[in-house]
Structures are given as structure tokens and as C-alpha cells.
Amino acid sequence: MAINVARPYPIIIVTGANSGVGFAVCQRLIEQLASPIPPDSLLKPSDEKSDLSCPLAPTQKLSLILACRNKGRAEKAQKLLWDALDKRIRWLKSRAGYNGHAEAFRKNLTIDFIQLDLASMDSVFSFTEEVESRYPYVSHIVMNAGFLPIIGLDYIYAIKEIFLDPARAVTQPRFMIQAEGLESPDGLGMVFQSNVLGHFSLFRELEGLLHKNPSGDSRVQWLSSLDCNAGDYDPADIQIRRGTYPYEASKFQEDLIVTALAHQAAANPPKEGEAHIQHSLSTPGICHTANTGPVLNFILELAKQASFYLARLFGSQNHPIDSYKGAVAVVYAILAPLAIL
């Protein structure tokens, strides 16, 4: 199947892309875009013939940028993504009506790694400078990377919460002990810089490239969390140096910023010839990732995972558990027509 790679194509940055939900977002994106009509862009299968089609489909090409701290892990992620795509292509080829799109897409796919440490402003600026030197524009940024400063568990409170409010205990637990007052190498609040300032600065530095997207529709997708809690945020403590739950506070602060950016974008239409930038929030729900690895042993990790499945068994819609499933909301927000978001 011949495709015209001169047509505008997506250039997508995903932070924290080497593992967890970030990796799952990358995997779903390349697998979805390997199909002429990405299934994740549809509200239901019958929408395939709808006039509201995926603005990226059929894709001619994709440049996927893995923005990660660790080079070794990023290179491993690159290999796993290529393997996942090849597996997807084999499955697509076995289906009736396959037209060769996936193989043509693969030839024009690039999966690049550019080092990014959100806790270092020098790293953020180096990253954006390299992006500006290598790519003519950016179409999407997925602000996924995050830092949870967990250092232990309050076992007494955990037992109490599990018995008195089990739904909250497995969805928005309050028994995780987090480090307070952590400072980044730049002398800023570590959680604030890693989860809020780093991503905000990344957007501002790349705002010009987002406006240059020739398709006219650029999107910045911010990953929030069910842990987001207004009660944990103190407006007088902008750098989140105090407080028992800095992660939850940072997620609420991020939500405030994204809401403000979305309102600004709506109130100030882009100049003629510039792409509109759409900001939106989504959450992957509760996924079994390694973020609690430093404080949970093997038995407790199994217990945590079992509790997630139990919650889902009792009807929870917040527990996809598998990061690949948790990435659906994020990928949908990237692929779906803007008119229905």
C-alpha cells in the first residue's frame, strides 16, 4: 500500500515513556495507528463509518519521542515497542480485508529517545532545544512522568482504612507515608518541580512548535490521578515543601494549571496560520505499576494486586489494573475528533 508521507503526520512526545502507563500509551498509539481507522478513536464499533473520524487517520507516518531519564531503559522500551508492533502487524495480516497499511506505516515509523529529567531545568531546556533542532513541529505532548515520594506505610492506619472504607483504601489510599520537604538539585521543591513545573516549562518551551503543526490541531494531554485532592494543597506553599501528601497536592496543582491553560486557549484563538492547542486531563485509573516497589515486599505486592482485582470484581470502574488498559483514556483523547472531546 503506497502512502504519501508528505502529508502532515503526528510528532508525539511522551514523558516517562520507558515503563508503566507511559510505555503503555506508546504501545497503544503505534498499534492503533497501524490500522487505517484506529479502534481507540471510536466511541463504539459502529462509529467506523461516522463523519467524525480520527483526525490522524489514516496515518502516513509517526515520529514518537520517548522522553526519559534513563538511556538503557529507553532503549529497552524502543525494542519492546518494535516487537509489539510486529506482533500487531502479524495479527492484522491474518484478518480478512487487510490492505497493507500496517506494513507501510511501519516503514515510516520512527521511535526516538531524547533524555529528559524533569527535576532539572537544564535537562528540560536541553531537551526542548534538541526537539527544536530535529523536528519541524510537535503535534502532541503526553505529560505522563511523575514522582511519588513514598517512603513507607502506616500499617495501623492501613488496617483501619481497609476495614472501615475498603473502596477508598484500594482507590485513594491515605496510609502511604511520603517524604516531606524534598529539594531538587535546582533548589526547588522536588515533587513540585518533577510533577508540575517541569511539565509546565516543557509546554511553554515547545509552545511555538505546537503552533507550527500543519494539521491545525495540536494537543497537550496531561495525566492526572484519582489521588488528586484539593484538601492536600496549600496555596501558600506553591513549591509543595510542606504537607503530608505532596503527590496529591501536586496533582491538584497540575489540574488547576491545565484548567487555566485550557481557558486561555479558548479565550485567545491562534493567529492565522497557527495551530490551535487543546489542553485536556485524563487519568489511567488504578494500574498495577512499580511506583510502590520501594516499600512493598513480594507478598505485599501480591496483596495489592489482589485487592485491585477484588475491587473490580465488586464493580469498580476505576481499576483497569493493566497499564495497557489504563492507557485507553489517554490514547482516546489523542485520537478522537476534537468535536466530541
Image (cartoon, grey):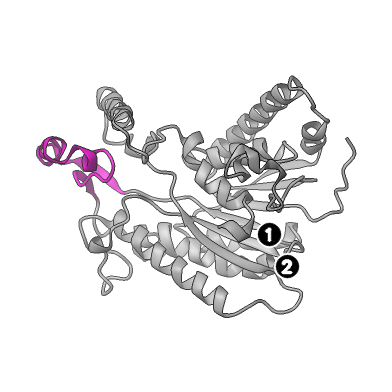
Residue type at mark 2 is Lys
**Circle 2 residue:** 212
As drawn, 146 above or below 152:
below
**Circle 1 residue:** 138
Viewer-nearest residue: 12 or 69: 12
- What kind of element bears circle 2? loop
Viewer-nearest residue: 23 or 179: 23
The quadrant holding residue 309 is: top left
The magenta span reads 149-178
Q: Is residue 314 left or right of residue 128?
A: left
Total marks in image: 2
Q: Give how far across and how far down residue 223 sits, in percent.
A: 46, 53
Asked whether residue 237 is in view, the answer is yes
Residue type at mark 1 is Val
Q: CA distance from mark 2 to mark 1?
A: 7 Å
Estimate how packed mark 1 is, as few (under 14), some (14 to 19) or many (20 or more) residues with alpha carbons within 10 Å. Answer: many
Residue at the spot 62% in from the left edge and 60% down from the top edge: 339
Q: Is residue 328 left or right of residue 8?
A: left
Q: Give how far across and how far down residue 65 sits, in percent.
A: 64, 48
Which part of the image, by quadrant, shows the N terminus? top right
Asked whether residue 70 is in view, the answer is no
